[in-house]
Amino acid sequence: MAKTVVVGGGIGGCAAALALHRAGADVIIYEAAPELKELGAGINVQAVAVSVLTDLGIPLEKFHAPSEGDAIFTSAVEYFTAEGFFISSEKVGLAAGASQPQLSAHRAKFHSTLLAECLRVLGQEKVILNSRFTQLESFEDHVILHFEKTTTKDPMPPVRCDFAVGADGLKSRVCRALLGDGAPRYTGRMIYRGLCEVEAIHADGCTVSLCGHENGNFICYPISEGMREKGQFLCNWGLCVLRTHPGGEEKWTSEATLEEIREELEEFGGNRFAGLTPLQLAERTEKIIGWSLFDRDPLESFDFGSVTLLGDAAHPLLPYGSQGATQAIMDAEALGVSYQNAMAKGTGIRGCVKEYSDLRCEVTGKVVIANRDMGSTAVLRVAAVETQGMAVDEKRTWCAEHGKRLHDEVIQKYRASMPKSVRAVAER
């Protein structure tokens, strides 16, 4: 049984550890955080990724039950112009005929569900916190990893393993050790996010809503099944806008003020979600977090001998189309399948890494490029461009007449281009 180290205990790292454990690997997670705090806000995880997690043995209710993950079973995504004119909508998850739901969840609760499963399956002693990766030494048949205590920077004993997986996020130290600097590329955009409570639900209480155009777009969706059952709305919202380079590093926890985004939110005042405008939702928010958005040009390979990369460490994505967590989980699935295949064929860790790279490197690179073009959210840009200069009534009529075309040409074209489950493809 090969000793495998996963560097990073986030969503992708936990999913990778579970998939590799299921495939027969002896897995240990090293996580830089001294303690796992509730960071981030909402995420959407597509049905294809939820299927991966349930196949790994996590009951769906662990994600959905109000007393546990509290995630919403998402039914649809709807798109509006900046003025509030309906453009189109798409059914998702169970409503679209998938075998599993799409989930709208609080990132921390979703991650906690995965982490709890890792602790249960791997054992407490195999999830090691306060361990920041510093460097690696790669040999023909093993890898030596070096860590330091995050809190004190004291060096830790070297860790020898057969296989190392870098799942340590956008600013991946493992990626830097393999590729040199590899600094992420600033995209010219910043996203502001917040959570607020509303005493009414929007639509069916399970819908993701977007409005705006290329230079600024707003998204909101529910992330608490418990509140939905009470007829209330725990609203996760985000505003993605153009900004000059901030001059610092990307952070998840940079607090922002409402005044920084008030004018841009006011532009979308024709939209109402649970009876409130985007600005009114932001005004109900106690803490607004803003951070700059970076990605990285697609890599040519994920094959580094006995080391590979996964999730944002391999292919950081702009936040369009609900792909970030989804693609990290699908990386994990492919890695588990590749490990199992390699052990059966006798091709070892290097055979595993090669197969994984072949399965995931090119297809995730295409997702990076598609998300630079706004993913399915590009329908907002297309509608804005094609209605530029129209009077209000003319624009409203145009949206009603062209919504079906935009659904097919923009939204569904993007969805159809997304990677498929490697296990499902193999079974077929």
Image (cartoon, rainbow, N blue to C red):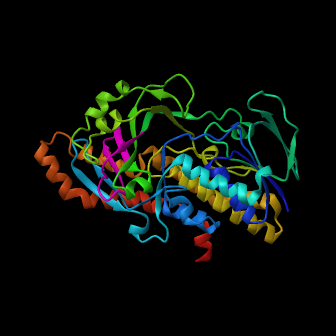
Relative to 264, 85 lies left or right: left
Residue 421 in view, yes or no: no
* Number of numbered tags placed on the structure image: 0
Residue 98, compared with residue 130, is above or below; it is below
Quadrant for residue 266, please give it.
top left
Image quarter where the N terminus lies is bottom right
Please provide the residue range marked out in magenta.
195-220
Of residue 154 and residue 395, the one placed in the foreground of this image is 154
- Tell whether 204 sits left or right of 134: left
Please state the horizontal and vertical placement of residue 187, each as a whole percent of the image.
48, 35
In the image, what residue occupies the spot 80% across and 33% down?
148
- Residue at the farthest bottom position: 428
In percent of the image, x 44 and y 32: which residue is there?
287
Q: Examine the rendering and report whether any part of residue 176 can be seen.
A: yes
**Residue 216 magenta-highlighted:** yes
Residue in front for this viewpoint, 255 or 67: 67
Task: List x then y, in percent, for residue 70.
Answer: 49, 55
The residue nearer to you, when weighing 387 against 242, is: 242
Q: Which residue is at a point 25% across and 34% down the rendered structure image? A: 267
- Is residue 160 depicted above or below 285 in this figure? below
Residue 405 in the image, given as x and y percentages of width and height = 27, 60
Q: Residue furthest top?
A: 247
Residue 393 position, x and y percent, is: 11, 47
* Rendered-image quadrant of the C terminus: bottom right
Residue at image position (78%, 28%) is 153
Q: Is residue 190 magenta?
A: no
Name the foreground residue: 321 vs 262.
Answer: 262
Reply above or below: 136 against 54.
Answer: above
